[in-house]
C-alpha cells in the first residue's frame, strides 16, 4: 500500500462473513464499497453495501476466498506484531463526503454493519455521510456490476 493512499481503519460487525475475524476485524486484502442499487447513488448509509461480503460456510468457504485474504496482516495479527489487520478500501460511493479521488475513502475509520446477513445488500457502510453533491460514478458502478474492473 502506498504511504499516501488514504485508507480508513475498518471495523466490521458482520460476523456471518467469511472475511470476518474476532475483534470485529476484516481479513480481506481489499473491500469494495458500492451503492446497493446500481444507478441509484446513496444518500443514506442503508443504500451502501460491502460488495466483498461472502457468506461463511465453514472452512471450505474460507479457503475459497483465499485470493482475497490479507495473509501478511493475518500472520502479523496472530503473532502480535502490533500492526492492525486491515483491508484496503475501494469505494465508488462518491456522494459520500469522505469519498476521495480514485475511489478511495479519506476518513480515519469506517464501520461496516448488518444483522443476520446472508447477502451483501444487507451490509452498510455506517460511516457514510451524504455530501449533497451529484455523482459522477454511476457508469463506473454499472461496469463493476457487470464484472468489469472500474479502476
Ligand atoms: S462484510 Fe465486508 S468488511 Fe465485513 S468482514 Fe466481510 S468483507 Fe470484510
Ligand atoms: S465512509 Fe464514505 S467514502 Fe468511506 S467507505 Fe464509507 S461510503 Fe465510502
Image (cartoon, rainbow, N blue to C red):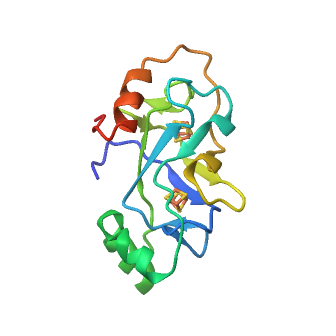
- Res 137 seen here: no
Residue at 62% across, 51% down? 111
Q: Is residue 107 above or below residue 63?
A: above
Residue depicted at x 49% and y 18%:
135
In percent of width and height, residue 18 lies at: 50, 69
Rendered view: 38 above or below 21: above
Q: For the view shown, which residue lies furthest in the top direction?
A: 134
Picture quarter with ligand 2: top right
Q: Could you say where residue 117 lies in the image, as x and y percent from the top left?
A: 65, 59
Considering the image in quadrants, where does the C terminus appear?
Answer: top left
Q: How many marks?
A: 0
- Rendered residue at 31%/72% (across/down): 72
> In which quarter of the view is residue 95 placed?
top right
Q: State whether residue 59 appears in this view.
A: yes
Quarter holding residue 102: top left
The residue shown at (68%, 31%) is 44
Query: Which sits in the foreground, 103 or 139?
Result: 139
Amino acid at each position: 500500500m502506498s504511504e499516501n493512499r488514504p485508507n480508513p481503519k475498518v471495523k466490521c460487525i458482520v460476523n456471518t462473513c467469511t472475511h470476518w475475524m474476532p475483534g470485529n476485524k476484516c481479513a480481506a486484502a481489499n473491500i469494495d464499497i458500492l451503492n446497493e442499487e446500481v444507478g441509484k447513488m446513496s444518500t443514506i448509509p442503508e443504500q451502501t453495501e460491502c460488495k466483498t461480503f461472502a457468506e461463511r460456510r465453514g472452512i471450505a468457504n474460507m479457503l475459497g476466498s483465499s485470493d482475497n485474504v490479507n495473509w501478511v496482516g493475518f500472520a502479523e495479527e496472530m503473532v502480535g506484531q502490533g500492526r492492525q489487520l486491515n483491508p484496503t478500501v475501494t469505494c465508488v460511493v462518491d456522494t459520500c463526503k469522505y469519498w476521495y479521488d480514485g475511489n478511495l475513502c479519506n476518513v480515519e475509520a469506517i464501520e461496516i454493519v448488518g444483522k443476520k446477513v446472508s447477502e451483501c445488500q444487507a451490509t452498510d457502510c455506517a460511516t457514510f455521510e451524504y455530501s449533497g453533491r451529484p455523482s459522477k460514478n454511476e457508469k463506473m458502478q454499472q461496469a463493476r456490476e457487470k464484472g468489469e474492473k472500474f479502476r
